[in-house]
Image: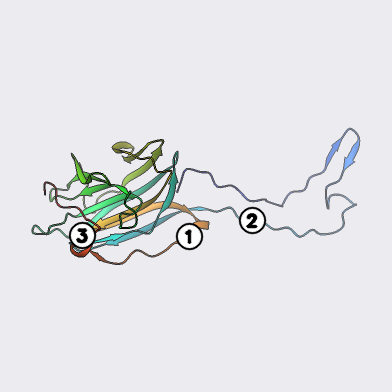
Amino acid sequence: MRSAAPQAGPSGASIRCWLSLGVLLLSSGCGDGGTGPTNTTTTTAPRIVTTEFTISRPSCFFGWSRPLESLSIGESFTVRFKPLSVDYMESADWGNTVDFWLDRLSADDDDAIGLIFNYVPDSRWWIDYFTPEGGFETTGKRELIHVNGDFREITFVRSEGVSKWLLDGEVILELVDHKPERMVYTRVVGTDALFQYEMTTSALATVRPESELRDCRIAEPIACGGRPGS
């Protein structure tokens, strides 16, 4: 969830009498002058809960999460993840990836930007990215992420003119970004991954299911990105 403290609702549980300068000020129902019992309503503040979901896709197929959070400039959001399995095929044209996007890449939204971990068999994933101007590109760097290992943590940080992705607190990607508001998504290609994030109980009613199974080979104009070096 975004870094904003939830506001507690009115308690309606405490009525106190104050004596000042010899004048007795009686609040409603306090002392002998009360008019009888007063009905009160207690509002429960939203609780923060951990939400967990998986996205599982075979080789050459991809799937998006539902929108996880809306982020404006000055806000941040954290998602924990770990790959559970990778359906790696040497002959496949598409990579096996775990992605973290600001807006969803589609024909209707051509300004999405994203961080992409692209699997190679030794578990050192290429750190790739997507921009509308350059398409899928690589940073040339790799990160050791064990399949079915410990959770890793991605934090989206939005600032004036730039968006950043932090891995376990360290900046690994920084892209120019002037869009006032963005929606957070995750995505996988040919991978089974588990995700966790915090949300308030008041937001649980808005949870929607994952998107449908999509095939990279017939997904134009949506691209899935190729293997590193392709």
Instruction: Say whether residue 49 is left or right of residue 41.
Output: left
Q: Nearer the viewer, residue 201 or 59?
A: 59
SS for callout 1: helix
Q: Where is mark 3, residue-wise?
A: 190
Tag 2 secondary structure: loop
Per the model, the C-alpha gap separating discs 3 and 1 is 28 Å
The amino acid type of the residue labelled 3 equals Gly
Q: Residue 204: give its label.
A: 1
User: Is 16 placed left or right of 140 in the picture?
Assistant: right
Mark 3 or mark 1, earlier in chain: 3
- The crowd level at tag 1 (other Cα within 10 Å; few <14, some 14-19, many 20+) is few
Q: Residues within 10 Å of mark 2 (few under 14, many from 20)?
A: few
- Residue ID for mark 2: 43
Q: Report the amino acid beneath label 2.
A: Thr
- Horizontal and vertical percent position of residue 40: 73, 58
| Farthest residue, direction left | 91
Disc 3 crowd rating (10 Å Cα; few below 14, some 14-19, many 20+) is many
Q: Quadrant of residue 65?
A: bottom left
Residue at left 21%, top 58%?
Answer: 85
> Could you tell me the amino acid type at mark 1?
Leu
What's the CA distance linking mark 2 and mark 1? 17 Å
N-terminal of the two: label 2 or label 1?
2
Q: Position of residue 110 (x, y in %)?
A: 31, 52
